[in-house]
Image: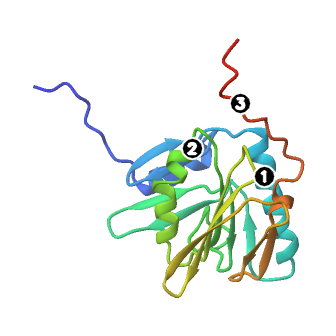
């Protein structure tokens, strides 16, 4: 007889109750709960720069900006997921007493080595399947680079930006991001020289 432990899925209600008292943020995918890792100072600075740009341009308008403490519920036919993006914009917010949002319009993720596989795989697929999403932004933290997915009439189109003067138009919320401003005060480490060796 097998001695392997049987996995018991966590219910959505139990997950949400747990998040109210948890000392760290956890994401939820189809009954499994995953602890989130902390980010670097560069990661936090980029996310803050993005949120500040959104906040400034959306002031006095109905869409709202949220930071990394706001989770989103994504409902699929076979499962429910909750993710915490780095920055988000919502134009149809949930009730103020809710602890999650349901209708993302813009999602921004700052990539790191520890989360890259997840951000560019499972999470990206989930965000692009959200019916209200207009734009997904993936920002590198080790260099100035943005990859954008914009929803068009025939689905999502991908674009890349890598120059400080590049302007990223987000027509769904009538906002323009300037790439250099998103990386303001971020100091990049020099690329290692492959010819240099270790000594």
To which residue does mark 1 refer? 46
Mark 3 or 1 closer to N-term? Answer: 1
Picture quarter containing residue 21?
top right
Percent across and percent down for residue 180 are: 85, 59
Question: Is residue 20 left or right of 47 when viewed as pictured?
Answer: left
Mark 3 or 2 closer to N-term? Answer: 2
Percent across and percent down for residue 124 are: 51, 60
Foreground tag (3 vs 1): 3
Question: Is residue 31 left or right of 194 when viewed as pictured?
Answer: left
Asked if 87 appears above or below 18 in the picture, the reply is below
Q: Nearer the viewer, residue 161 or 35?
A: 161
Say what secondary structure mark 2 lies in: loop
All told, the count of numbered labels is 3
Query: Which quadrant, please, contains the N terminus?
Result: top left
Please tell me the numbered disc located at residue 26: none
**Quick one: label 2, few (<14), some, or many (20+) residues within 10 Å?**
some
Mark 2 or 1 closer to N-term? Answer: 1
Say what secondary structure mark 1 lies in: helix
Q: Are marks 3 and 2 in contact (CB under 8 Å)?
A: no
Tell me which residue sits at (26%, 31%) in the image.
5
Please tell me the numbered disc located at residue 115: 2
Instruction: Let me know if residue 198 appears in the view.
Output: yes
**Quick one: label 1, few (<14), some, or many (20+) residues within 10 Å?**
many
Query: Which quadrant, please, contains the C terminus?
Result: top right
What's the CA distance linking mark 3 and mark 2? 21 Å
Q: Nearer the viewer, residue 79 or 87?
A: 87
Tell me which residue sits at (68%, 82%) in the image.
172
What colour scheme was applied to this rendering of the protein? rainbow
To which residue does mark 3 refer? 192
What's the CA distance linking mark 3 and mark 1? 22 Å
């Amino acid at each position: 007889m097998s001695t392997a432990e049987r996995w018991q899925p966590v219910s959505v209600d139990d997950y949400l109750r747990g998040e109210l008292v948890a000392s760290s943020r956890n994401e939820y995918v189809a009954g499994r709960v995953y602890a989130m890792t902390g980010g670097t100072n560069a990661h936090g600075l980029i996310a803050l720069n993005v949120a500040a740009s959104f906040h400034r341009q959306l002031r006095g308008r109905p869409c709202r900006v949220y930071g990394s403490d706001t989770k989103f519920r994504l409902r699929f036919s076979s499962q429910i997921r909750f993710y915490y993006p780095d920055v988000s914009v919502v134009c149809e917010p949930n009730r103020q007493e809710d602890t999650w949002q349901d209708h993302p319009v813009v999602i921004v993720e700052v990539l790191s080595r520890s989360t890259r596989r997840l951000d560019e795989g499972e999470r990206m697929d989930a965000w692009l399947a959200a019916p209200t999403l207009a734009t997904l932004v993936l920002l590198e933290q080790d260099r100035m680079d943005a990859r954008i997915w914009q929803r068009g009439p025939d689905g999502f189109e991908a674009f890349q930006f890598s120059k400080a003067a590049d302007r990223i138009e987000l027509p769904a919320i009538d906002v323009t991001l300037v790439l250099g401003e998103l990386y303001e005060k971020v100091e990049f480490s020099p690329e290692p020289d492959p010819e240099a060796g270790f000594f």
